Image (tube, coloured by chain):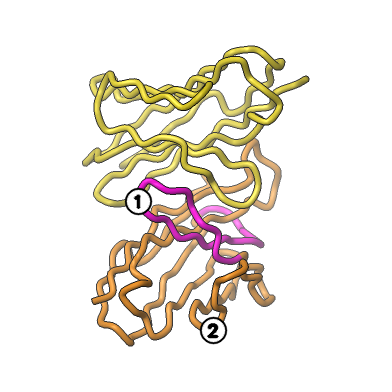
Chain colours: A yellow, B orange
Amino acid sequence: EDKVVQSPLSLVVHEGDTVTLNCSYEVTNFRSLLWYKQEKKAPTFLFMLTSSGIEKKSGRLSSILDKKELFSILNITATQTGDSAVYLCAVDSNYQLIWGAGTKLIIKP
Amino acid sequence: GAVVSQHPSWVICKSGTSVKIECRSLDFQATTMFWYRQFPKQSLMLMATSNEGSKATYEQGVEKDKFLINHASLTLSTLTVTSAHPEDSSFYICSARVLAGAHNEQFFGPGTRLTVL
């Protein structure tokens, strides 16, 4: 059975801290792994990862995929209160998205 | 727990036909379900919010007569794309909101890929 597991479930840190969010997966036919940020209405696309070891970066956010160990991490450096959100990881397997349960990140000022 | 399923996974239809997509919460009750469209490498676009027993709330720009939503029970919402056209081809994703509190209230389905010829 395909599954995607995110950890931790919730995380509370102070502004300025660096956080690492984890996403591990077991799927039958891996095509890509996607990270989203959800604040209110709809998840906002962050990254799509298909190749192992290549870091994708956007501002203070970065992500990397390890296809051998079947996981990805999302790093956020110098966190700000605006980073507070639920971060979702999804794996495209056979053209279906298998979603993790999300990590709720709270940044305290 | 908190599994959301969608049926069908993939559908190909002719232009002008209608297609129904089901979204089910398998092991929990969901008073609210959401329908999204996703384009490759893009964010999910919220189409409508579906509340059990009442009319759906559509986002601006989404035609309610074209995308019919029915939320007949606490575990099932359906999206019917009426008179589908090629521009309706997309990946449709639903999500369901858990009734009881959880670290994340919303859980997503695997999506339905619609191709209109």
Q: Can I make out residue B77 in this image?
A: yes
Q: Residue at x 45, y 60 (%)?
A: B37
Residue on which the image places disc 1:
B40
Indicate whether A48 appears above or below B10: above
Element under label 1? loop
Indicate whether B107 appears above or below B11: above
Residue on which the image places disc 2:
B65
Q: Which residues are magenta?
A: B27-48
Q: Position of residue A65 (x, y in %)?
A: 32, 24
Q: Position of residue B70 (x, y in %)?
A: 56, 76
Q: Is residue B85 left or right of residue A5?
A: left
Q: Is residue B111 magenta?
A: no
Disc 1 with disc 2 on a shared chain: yes
Q: Can I make out residue A101 in this image?
A: no
Q: Position of residue B19 (x, y in %)?
A: 37, 78
Element under label 2? loop
Mark 1 or mark 2: name the one nearer the start of the chain.
1
Q: CA distance from mark 1 to mark 2?
A: 26 Å
